[in-house]
Amino acid sequence: RTRLLSQQLTWLRQVRDVVFYSESEIASLPTVGLRPAFREELVGSGAWKNFPALIDLHKRFPLHKWVYFSDDDTFVYVCNLLSRLGHYREDNDYYIGLYWTPRVDMEWQEGQIAYASG
């Protein structure tokens, strides 16, 4: 069983385009399977799949203004999320969330910025 079913029955009903990414196939859900690069599954407890997912999302939805990632244990108040995003310009680059990286090589040189998920 998966916690994604409860998301589908609640807050995901308010979201127009949803894609599930997983390293395991879930027959009851439309999942896109991702496989980690060699030894990458050892780093970041699953964060390795976010970059391939971003590339895939851009190909699927090239005109979308925002991308939101969450795990299967997350509940989102969609109205609050959209209200918060309304304070930002979609033509600027933002990372909104927790800063964390297990690898120094994932940090950019311009400062304490890293790709993050959460």
Image (cartoon, rainbow, N blue to C red):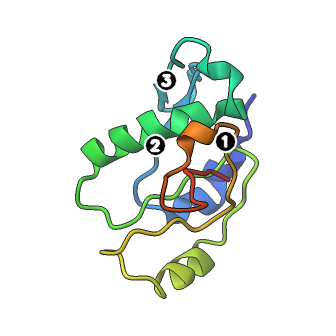
Amino acid beneath label 3: Leu
In which quadrant is the N terminus drawn? top right
Q: 2 above or below 73?
A: above
Q: 114 above or below 95?
A: above
* First in sequence: mark 3 vs mark 1: 1
Residue under circle 1?
Answer: 4
The x, y position of residue 118, in whole percent, is: 68, 53
Q: Nearer the viewer, residue 55 or 43?
A: 43
Residue under circle 3?
Answer: 34
Query: In the image, what residue occupies the spot 49% across and 54% down?
Result: 109
The x, y position of residue 44, in whole percent, is: 69, 34
Q: Is residue 5 left or right of residue 83?
A: right
Amino acid beneath label 1: Leu
Of labels 3 and 1, the one closer to you: 3
Q: Which mark is residue 61?
A: none
Q: Element at badge 3?
A: loop
* First in sequence: mark 1 vs mark 2: 1
State the image quarter where residue 76 is shown. Answer: bottom right
Are the residues tagged 1 and 2 within 8 Å (C-beta)?
no
Q: 55 above or below 116?
A: above
The x, y position of residue 88, in whole percent, is: 45, 83
